[in-house]
Image (tube, rainbow, N blue to C red):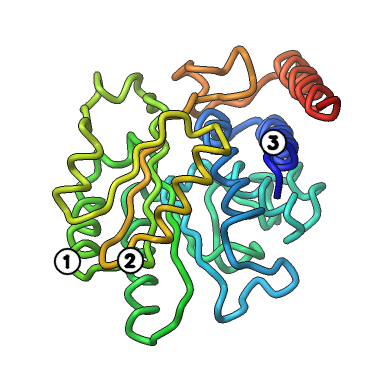
Amino acid sequence: MENLELQKNANEIRKGIVTAVHAAKAGHPGGSLSAAETFTYLYFEEMNIDPKDPKKADRDRFVLSKGHTAPGLYSTLANRGFFPVEDLKTLRQIGSHLQGHPCIQHTPGIDMSSGSLGQGISAAVGMALSAKLSNDNYRVYTLLGDGEIQEGQVWEAAMFAGHRKLDNLVVIVDNNGLQIDGKIDDVCSPYPIDDKFKAFNFHVINVADGNDFDQLRAAFKEAKETKGMPTAIVMKTVKGKGVSYMENQAGWHGKAPNDEEYKTAMEELEKAGEALCQK
């Protein structure tokens, strides 16, 4: 898919994120928006998946380890055709299949329930090991927050993955620099992130702009070509990307826009979409 089409999809995914969180009056827009390009690239370009057959045996797997950014994953799955985009307006409502964190039992396209930070990567490592033991050729991708990697379980999983040479595993760190309490390096610095993964026998790719499709394409290509060790892609992103008043603001980690803020955000995203259509 051409970059322009990917950019249009990412913009639609951002609209879905803002719409869902506004409708729910709760949720996590900041880290969902920062990862919109990653979600887009994975589901529209990188992964072997089929919305008509969400459980096909040879599909690539994705685990949203930072499960609170479910609005980003839900919007992506909806725009990819796993379920109607209209469902996004039911986020977090009683009886909806779209709850605050991903649930494998209820939502088409979800490969693992997640949300307790640090645990998703362990599940992804287990999936990658299973593929190796069964001689299956599917790949496993997992997305972590940079605040999440302050959890010790992340590094236990990384140690195991590196030791078992799980080259079918790609760990992506959304390094937007902010977590719920502020800057990650003020709360409990995980830097240097790349050297830590290297110490656990990962091939590490630093992406200077994780909101740029050329850079993401190059990184995922390199990951696929890496043999004998797992890959960690550490990507610098902008929290709240695409909505001016949310960008680089820790306060938008877990807060819903009010009606006026929603209107402003959607107007900005509509304008961004129109600009892309004129290219």
Q: Quadrant of the C terminus?
A: top right
Residue 67: percent from the left, percent from the top?
47, 48
Which residue is denoted by mark 3 in the rendering?
7
Secondary structure under the numbered disc 1 in the rendered image: helix
Which residue is denoted by mark 2 in the rendering?
167
Residue 117: percent from the left, percent from the top?
35, 47
| Left-right relation of 49 to 15 | left
Cβ atoms under marks 1 and 2 closer than 8 Å: no
Residue 249: percent from the left, percent from the top?
48, 16
- Residue at left offset 46%, top offset 68%: 139
Q: Earlier in the sequence, mark 1 or mark 3?
A: 3
Secondary structure under the numbered disc 3 in the rendered image: helix
| Left-right relation of 234 to 112 | left
In space, the residues marked 1 and 3 are separated at their CA atoms by: 37 Å
The residue type indicated by label 3 comes to Gln
The residue type indicated by label 1 comes to His
